[in-house]
């Protein structure tokens, strides 16, 4: 296997090694095989293009085209021309899948199911990183910068995984990068000649045979390419270890991340669940109200048919989230609700529910409390919250199920006379962190001043938020973050359902009332056929407070949303001062005001969305929310263009060095006359050379042009490391200046003088005899400059080389020449004459 082929294989292996860190994020891992196959094909195309050989930009372009064709066949062949060629429909499909993938990443816990969008992100991301690594390490022969995209790939996995990506995946990714560096070092050494085994002189000084080959010694010091590769590898691995350790963690906010519950449960299995609060926050700007589900029920009055998705019972001062609890198989009949007494009036209700084909949610919407659920699929039961959670990718997309539930109707008197809750339950559900601002507790005490029972305090809190506290419903208010989020809400008195539910639950806990937050839907809108439709704008969050004998009871603190429970409307305790609640609206008024989106939503709400819009995974096309596919494509293209502009000086410099020292297409500038004496050298880099290796022109020997190109590369190498060219110096003086300022010693200094002597020989000798091996001499000088430079200067010489200014000068010169040609062209002359004649006629007039 040749060195170039070996480097190609190592680049692909390094990419796949770094991609292994993504394996724990999703389940199943079959996408990895697809990514490996596609990456192999793209790498093979690059190897064939380099063997032709094609120009380097054309090689990269061919790989990009093939990668696009492969992704089209894999993800959008039904929208492609002849199942292969991408058209506008294909790019729109890619945009939709990317939108869905980004949404799925934010809503699924780890390990997430491999949806179509997530699979495109994984396969496409690995393919893009592999293409960049192959271009840098193999096409442009610079493996060290290829560590940056590999590190980015690993960092994505480390950032998304809980607790980091793990040391094993880091070792695999690091081993792949080191393998790539060693392969590049071996390939570079092979270009110098054979590396002999055994011990040599021990001096480590390179010896030349015929001016072409290089003999190293096994006992001598490490060769420069290998030594540099090891240093870069150690630096990158060190950065990858240290940076994640010192980065500060991001705290949650009032809308903090809710982590899906996990537990052993009967039968085992990991539960991946949609994060309801992330979905709530991301969906506020959805302008379109779509039907989420439809149900028929035996309940005569559906105003209390709130469909509950999940209960958030863990409060850390900045966010509410579900506790991590054990789940088990769904029993034939669910256990009796905790705390429900036989004295409380209950009505059995049967409900048949059908969800929309596009609605994908891992928690199953249920009326509370459900006593029996008949549904097919992989569902698990969490007893404490009485929720059903999808297992191994199971979701609510297009499901039909039957629910038997209880309509609990306690009286205000029963709630008022409720005994104290069990000590264990009270301890768990009245916890508040020390970081909670004191104003929350003080406000709760002030609002409930004079209330004798927990029920009276709860009604006082509800009425203060929903009626007489001066609060307004506004979906455009920012959620805020940190421990001061609730305090800011209490001060500003503007927010949406999450603010009200979270704040009331937190304040109830400070008063010793067990509380949690429920997320789900309001009852929806009755249809003419007798069914009830629940849409995106019916999504909601509300507090649940525990009363012994009743269990968890719903309260409604959010103004203009939902309906106030009956047990908070009658026998309402009176209070003094400003805490006296305003007259309560009638039931008919509450029903007419909600939950219909057209009646209950304020103008701002109708414009930007409801209290909460659940996530939508549409299989029928875009839903109208979020950026358009073309906007996504434009953003991706813009990012790619910015990245290319950032690495353009590096790529131009690598291309220039390769052409000068390895031969290639000629460029104007260095040798310009017809004989060796007239050949002109510009050691200062005054802008006449565009970076290419000059070709032999009429009468100029090929060795002369190669010598001039090598000298030009030596001058520009010094320029990259801060040694400005000086056109007034002879080659010998210029070399002495580079040696002095660059602090070159030993072989590097001698190599610089030999290159200068060779230049003077081809310029001034009667019969020039160019010296061989000048490319190796220039490489030796560059190594000396690199070793003597500081780390900051090395990075600048690599990423932002000063000599790249030649490209700007060349473009400016060509543009000036183009303008000069346009000014002297016949059409321009005709225009000038016509303008002059017109001006003369006006003057005469």
Image (cartoon, helix red, strand yellow):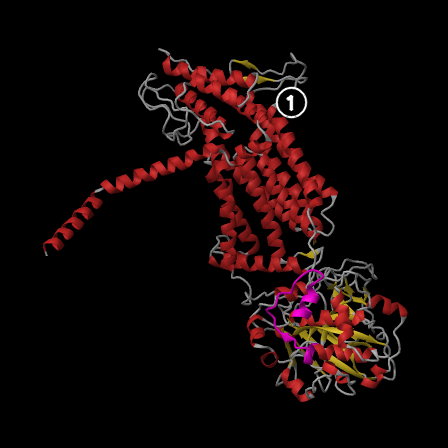
Is residue 72 positioned above or below 499 on the image? above
Mark 1 residue element: loop
| Label 1 packing within 10 angstroms: few (<14), some (14-19), many (20+) | few
Is residue 748 positioned above or below 162 on the image? above
Snapshot quadrant of residue 762: top left
Instruction: Say if residue 411 shows up in the picture.
Output: no
User: How many badges with numbers are in the image?
Assistant: 1
Relative to 12, 771 lies left or right: left
The region drawn magenta spans: 465-491
Front position in the image: 16 or 491: 491
At which x and y percent is residue 422? 89, 72
Which quadrant holds the C terminus? bottom left
Whether residue 473 is in magenta: the answer is yes
At which x and y percent is residue 602? 58, 77
Snapshot quadrant of residue 252: bottom right
Which quadrant holds the N terminus? top right
Q: Which residue position is annotated with label 1?
A: 222
Instruction: Say if residue 436 shows up in the picture.
Output: yes
At which x and y percent is residue 408? 79, 81
Front position in the image: 218 or 463: 463
Front position in the image: 359 or 518: 518
Whether residue 723 is in magenta: the answer is no
Could you tell me which residue is drawn at 87 percent across and 84 percent down? 343
């Amino acid at each position: 296997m040749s060195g170039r082929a070996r480097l190609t294989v190592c680049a692909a292996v390094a990419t796949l090694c770094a991609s292994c860190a993504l394996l724990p994020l999703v389940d199943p891992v079959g996408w990895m095989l697809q990514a490996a196959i596609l990456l192999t094909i793209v790498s093979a195309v690059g190897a064939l293009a380099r063997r032709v050989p094609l120009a380097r930009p054309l090689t990269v372009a061919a790989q990009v085209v093939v990668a696009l064709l492969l992704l089209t066949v894999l993800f959008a062949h039904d929208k492609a021309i002849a199942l292969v060629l991408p058209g506008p429909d294909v790019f729109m499909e890619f945009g939709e899948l990317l939108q869905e993938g980004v949404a799925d990443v934010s809503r699924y816990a780890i390990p997430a199911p491999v949806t179509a969008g997530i699979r495109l992100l994984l396969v496409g991301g690995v393919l893009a990183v592999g293409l960049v690594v192959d271009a840098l390490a193999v096409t442009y022969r610079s493996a060290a910068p290829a560590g940056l995209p590999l590190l980015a790939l690993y960092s994505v996995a480390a950032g998304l995984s809980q607790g980091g990506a793990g040391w094993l995946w880091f070792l695999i990714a690091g081993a792949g990068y080191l393998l790539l560096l060693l392969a590049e070092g071996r390939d570079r050494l092979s270009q110098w000649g054979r590396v002999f085994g055994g011990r040599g002189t021990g001096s480590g000084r390179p010896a030349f045979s015929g001016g072409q080959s290089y003999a190293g010694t096994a006992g001598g010091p490490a060769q420069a390419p290998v030594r540099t590769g090891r240093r870069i590898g150690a630096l990158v691995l060190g950065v990858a270890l240290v940076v994640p350790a010192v980065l500060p963690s991001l705290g949650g906010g009032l809308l903090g991340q809710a982590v899906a519950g996990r537990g052993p449960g009967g039968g085992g299995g990991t539960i991946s669940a949609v994060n309801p609060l992330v979905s709530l926050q991301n969906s506020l700007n959805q302008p379109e109200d779509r039907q989420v589900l439809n149900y028929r029920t035996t309940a005569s009055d559906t105003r209390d048919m709130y469909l509950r998705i999940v209960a958030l019972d863990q409060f850390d001062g900045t966010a509410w989230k579900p506790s991590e609890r054990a789940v088990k198989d769904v029993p034939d009949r669910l256990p009796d609700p905790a705390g429900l007494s036989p004295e409380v009036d209950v009505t059995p209700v049967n409900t048949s529910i059908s969800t929309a084909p596009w609605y994908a949610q891992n928690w199953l919407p249920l009326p509370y409390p459900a006593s029996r659920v008949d549904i097919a699929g992989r569902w698990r039961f969490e007893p404490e919250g009485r929720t059903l959670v999808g297992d191994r990718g199971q979701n609510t997309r297009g499901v039909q199920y039957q629910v038997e539930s209880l309509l609990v109707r306690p009286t205000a008197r029963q709630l008022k006379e409720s005994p104290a809750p069990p000590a264990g339950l009270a301890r768990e559900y009245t916890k508040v962190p020390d970081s909670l601002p004191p104003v929350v507790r003080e406000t709760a005490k002030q609002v409930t001043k004079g209330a004798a029972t927990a029920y009276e305090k709860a009604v006082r809190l509800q009425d203060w938020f929903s009626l007489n506290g001066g609060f307004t419903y506004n979906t455009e208010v920012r959620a805020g973050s940190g421990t001061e989020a609730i305090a800011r809400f209490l001060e500003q008195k503007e927010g949406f359902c999450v603010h009200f539910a979270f704040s009331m639950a937190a304040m109830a806990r400070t008063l010793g009332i067990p509380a949690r937050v429920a997320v789900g839907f309001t009852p929806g809108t009755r249809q003419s056929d007798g069914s009830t439709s629940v849409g995106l704008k019916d999504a909601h969050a509300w507090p649940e407070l525990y009363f012994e004998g009743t269990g968890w009871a719903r309260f409604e603190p959010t103004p203009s949303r939902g309906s106030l429970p009956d047990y908070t409307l009658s026998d309402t305790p009176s209070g003094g001062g400003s805490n006296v609640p305003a007259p309560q609206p009638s039931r008919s008024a509450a029903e007419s005001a909600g939950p219909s989106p057209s009646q209950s939503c304020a103008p701002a709400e109708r414009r930007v969305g409801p209290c909460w819009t659940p996530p939508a995974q549409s299989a029928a096309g875009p839903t109208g929310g979020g950026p358009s596919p073309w906007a996504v494509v434009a953003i991706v293209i813009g990012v790619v263009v910015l990245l290319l502009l950032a690495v353009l000086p590096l790529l131009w410099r690598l291309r220039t060095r390769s052409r000068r020292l390895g031969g290639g297409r000629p460029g104007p500038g260095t040798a310009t006359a017809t004989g060796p004496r007239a050949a002109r050298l510009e050691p200062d880099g005054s802008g006449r050379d565009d970076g290419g290796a000059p070709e032999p022109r009429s009468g100029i020997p090929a060795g002369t042009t190669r010598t001039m190109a090598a000298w030009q590369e030596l001058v520009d190498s010094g320029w990259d490391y801060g040694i400005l060219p000086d056109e007034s110096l002879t080659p010998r003086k210029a070399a002495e200046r580079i040696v002095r300022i660059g602090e070159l010693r030993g072989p590097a200094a001698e190599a610089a003088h030999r290159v200068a002597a060779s230049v003077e020989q081809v310029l001034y000798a009667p019969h020039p005899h160019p010296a061989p091996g000048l490319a190796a001499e220039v490489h030796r000088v560059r190594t000396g400059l690199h070793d003597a430079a500081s780390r900051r200067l090395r990075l600048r010489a690599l990423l932002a080389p000063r000599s790249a200014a030649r490209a700007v000068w060349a473009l400016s010169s060509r543009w000036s020449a183009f303008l000069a040609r346009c000014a002297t062209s016949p059409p321009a002359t005709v225009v000038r004459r016509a303008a002059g004649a017109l001006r003369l006629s006006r003057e005469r007039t």
